[in-house]
Image (cartoon, rainbow, N blue to C red):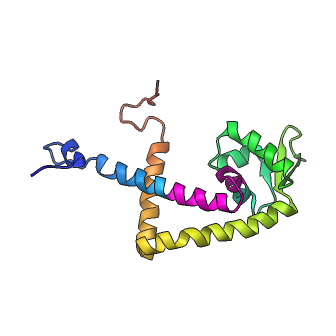
Amino acid sequence: MMKNKGEQASGSSGRASSLRIIRPLVEAYLGFVRESDRNIRLMGLTPGQFDVIATLGDTDGMSCRELSRKTLVTKGTLTGLLDRLLSKGLISEEVSPTDRRSRIIRLSEKGDEIFRRTFDAQIHYLDPFFERALKEEEMELLRTLLLKIRDEFSKKGSNGGGKEQTRE
């Protein structure tokens, strides 16, 4: 009987191979991004704009540093993205009262209206995908497992050799 690639990679020792989960994990991620981004674009936003607006929604604003940590947008992309949102009148910025070197970014009234309209619409669009695929307890288990994987990849030197791997 022919083994699939994941089974071949685990070898004869019977050890579980991460290859068995990498492909389905990536395929699920790509499917999610495709559907999510498509819906965001139908609402007139880019995924990066939506990420910033959703992160700022229901807050009193935050510094650029905090916004960078809380979004999925890279620091290099964030500056241009904030400039575009500012020019569209969706955010405002002011000098931080506690640190004159820092700016506080907030949603404008127009930005808040877009947040209210798009955030709930995006959740409403995505929920059925998860609800059709998973029961509530499976969603909680999946969340727990994904957080464990994320945390492991976040550790420095977690490759087993004690040194952080670099890509050339």
Query: In this view of the protein, which residue sits in the foreground, 121 or 41?
Result: 41
> Percent from the top left, x then y, of residue 116?
75, 69
In this rendering, the answer to whether 54 lies above or below 18 is: below
Q: Position of residue 121 (x, y in %)?
A: 66, 70
At 39% across and 36% down in the image, what residue appears? 159
Residue 149 placement (x, y as % from top left): 43, 51
Residue 40 is situated, as x and y percent measured from the top left of the image, at 64, 60
**Residue 74 seen in the figure:** yes
User: Is 21 situated above or below 75?
Assistant: below
Within the image, what quadrant is residue 118 found in? bottom right
- Principal secondary structure, stretch drawn in magenta: helix
Of residues 102 and 115, the one drawn nearer to the viewer in this rendering? 115
Farthest residue toward the front?
42
Q: Is residue 90 left or right of residue 121?
A: right
* 165 lies left or right of 7: right
Residue 58 visible, this angle: no
Q: Residue at x 50, y 58 (%)?
A: 32
Residue lying at 63% horizontally and 66% vertically, measured from the top left? 122
Report if residue 43 lies within the magenta region.
yes
Q: Nearer the viewer, residue 10 or 8?
A: 8
Say which residue appears at 43% left-offset and 29% top-offset: 163
Left or right: residue 130 versus residue 10 is right
Magenta-tinted stretch:
32-52
Residue 41 lies in the magenta-colored region? yes
